[in-house]
Image: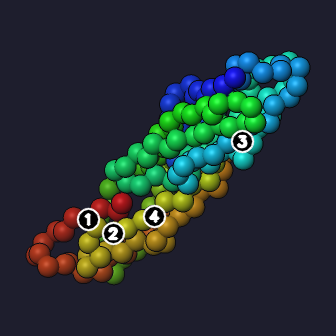
Amino acid sequence: DALGLSIDQGFVVAGDTAYQTVTRAGGDMAEALTVTLTADDPALSVPGSVTIPAGLNWVEYEITGVTHTQGIAPTVLVTASAAGYGDGTANVAVTAPTLTFVPAAVTVLIGDTLELVLTRPVSESDADLTVELEASDTEVFTVSPASVTFAADETEADVTVTGISSGAASGLNTGYVT
């Protein structure tokens, strides 16, 4: 007797949810089966357990992309286990959320402060998401807060950029918020 795991798209976006299915092959279908779930990386959240109802050989459950490190899409191994069954496993990639600033580009003068809005699509907002923010050149400008947290279903967060100095180079200096 064995357990199987599948996910429709093979990935989940950080700050969003997807559905995964656990199936059982063999065993007593007349009885409900409790399946323990684990993920080998905190970048993905899975429920601690799910129950396959009596008479069925599968159950679907929600998984949540929690974090994503810039430039790295972690692949998380999800394991399903139950007494009397061989383990089932599946790899799930946690991909970067789509984030944009409005406006997309600004000019900040020394001593000036501008407000930007960091946004994420509604289609990627089913779960909480914390985003770390960083100025590419802190001699030229600062960004605050250092991180923003989107609650589930929240799609906008305010960010402040402050001009500090002209930096080491003369003339117009360019920086990025990442």
Of pointers 2 and 3, the one earlier in the residue sequence: 3
Residue 175 — which label? 1
Q: Look at discs 2 and 3 and give the one toward the viewer.
A: 3
| 56 to the left or right of 140 | right
Residue 106 — which label? none
Amino acid carrying mark 3 in the image: Thr
Look at the numbered discs 2 and 1 and tell me whether their residues touch, using CB distance below 8 Å: yes
Of pointers 3 and 4, the one earlier in the residue sequence: 3
Instruction: Check the image and name the residue furthest to the left.
Output: 170
- What is the distance, in whole Å, between disc 4 and disc 1 at their CAs? 16 Å
Location of residue 29 with respect to 69 vertically, above or below: above
Residue 135 — which label? 2
Among the 4 quarters of the image, the one containing residue 149: bottom right
Of pointers 3 and 1, the one earlier in the residue sequence: 3
Quarter of the picture holding the C terminus: bottom left
Residue 65 visible here: yes
Instruction: Check the image and name the residue furthest to the front.
Output: 84
- What is the distance, in whole Å, between disc 2 and disc 4 at their CAs? 11 Å
In this view, the residue in front, 12 or 76, is 76
How crowded is the residue under tag 1: few (<14 C-alpha within 10 Å), some, or many (20+)? few
In this view, the residue in front, 92 or 172, is 92
Q: Which residue is mark 4?
A: 132
How crowded is the residue under tag 3: few (<14 C-alpha within 10 Å), some, or many (20+)? some
Colouring rule applied to residues: rainbow
Among the 4 quarters of the image, the one containing residue 174: bottom left
Of pointers 2 and 1, the one earlier in the residue sequence: 2
- For the point 49% across and 72% down, which residue is it? 145
- What is the distance, in whole Å, between disc 3 and disc 4 at their CAs? 32 Å
Look at the numbered discs 2 and 4 and tell me whether their residues touch, using CB distance below 8 Å: no
Q: Which residue is mark 3?
A: 36
Residue 138 image position (x, y, % from top left): 29, 76
Of pointers 4 and 1, the one earlier in the residue sequence: 4
